[in-house]
Image: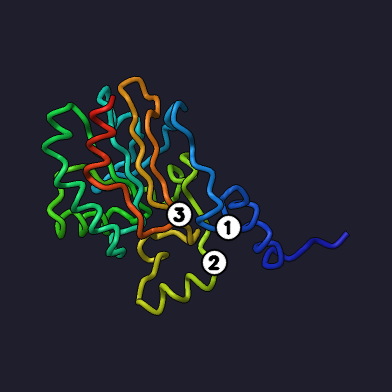
Amino acid sequence: MKSIPLLLLLPFVFTALFADVAADAADVTVIKAGSEAPNPTLVTIDGTETSLSELRGTDPTVVVFYRGGWCPYCNTHLASLQETMPQLKEKGWKLIALSPDKPEELLKTVEKQKLDYTLVSDSKMVAAEAFGVAFQLQEPMLKMLKSYKIDVVAASGEEHKQLPIPAVFLIDAEGKITFVFSNPDYKTRLSSSELLKAVSGM
C-alpha cells in the first residue's frame, strides 16, 4: 500500500485541528453563566507562561476578550474599561483582557492606551476556544483585513487565522462565571455603565 504524501495530508490535518472552532462569528457557542471558569494557559507581556487562575488569584475578575490592538473598536473599548478601573478596584475586582496578540503587540497597546490593568496573550486561542468565543476567519474576511494592512498572523505569531468575538465574563472568587456578554458583531461592546451595573449586582 502506497503512503500518502504529507503535502496532500496537510489540508486535512489543518481542518481536523480546528474542527471544533466555529466557521463564522455568528456560530460560536459561548460558555454560559453558572459554569466553572476554564483555566487555560496564557502568556504575559514579558513572555512568561501563566494560567487564568493564577492571574485571578482569589479576587472576583472581569475577563474581556478583544480582537487585537489593530482593531479601532477594541482600542475604544479598552480605553473605556480603563475609565472603570477606580470603581472596579474599589469593589475589589480585577480586570484581565485577552487577545490573540503576541506579547510584543500587547506592550504596544498598553503603552499607547496607558492601561493599568492586565493584558495577556492568548495567541494560540486556547482561552478563546475554552470560553467558546473563537471563530475561524474565512478568505473574504482575510482579504478585507489585508486591504486595511492588517495581518492577523503577524499580530499573533500563529497560523490559525482565528479571532475571538468580543466578550466579557464576570468570574467570582470561587471561579464560577456569574455574568456573560458576547456579540458576534465586533462593533457592539458592553458599555462601561453596563459593566459597572453587572459588577454592582453581585
In the image shown, does 178 or 145 lie closer to the viewer? 178
Q: Which residue is mark 1?
A: 23
Q: Are marks 1 and 2 in contact (CB under 8 Å)?
A: yes
Q: Which residue is mark 2?
A: 138
Which quadrant would the C terminus be assigned to in this image?
top left
In the image shown, does 89 or 104 lie closer to the viewer? 89
Q: Which residue is mark 3?
A: 184
Q: Amino acid at mark 3?
A: Pro
Instruction: Name the side, left or right, on which 76 lies relative to 99.
Output: left
* Mark 1 vs mark 2, CA separation in Å: 7 Å
Q: Amino acid at mark 2?
A: Gln
Q: Amino acid at mark 1?
A: Ala
Residue 162: x and y in percent read 48, 58
Which quadrant would the N terminus be assigned to in this image?
bottom right
* Mark 3 vs mark 1, CA separation in Å: 12 Å
Q: Residue at x 36, y 71 (%)?
A: 150
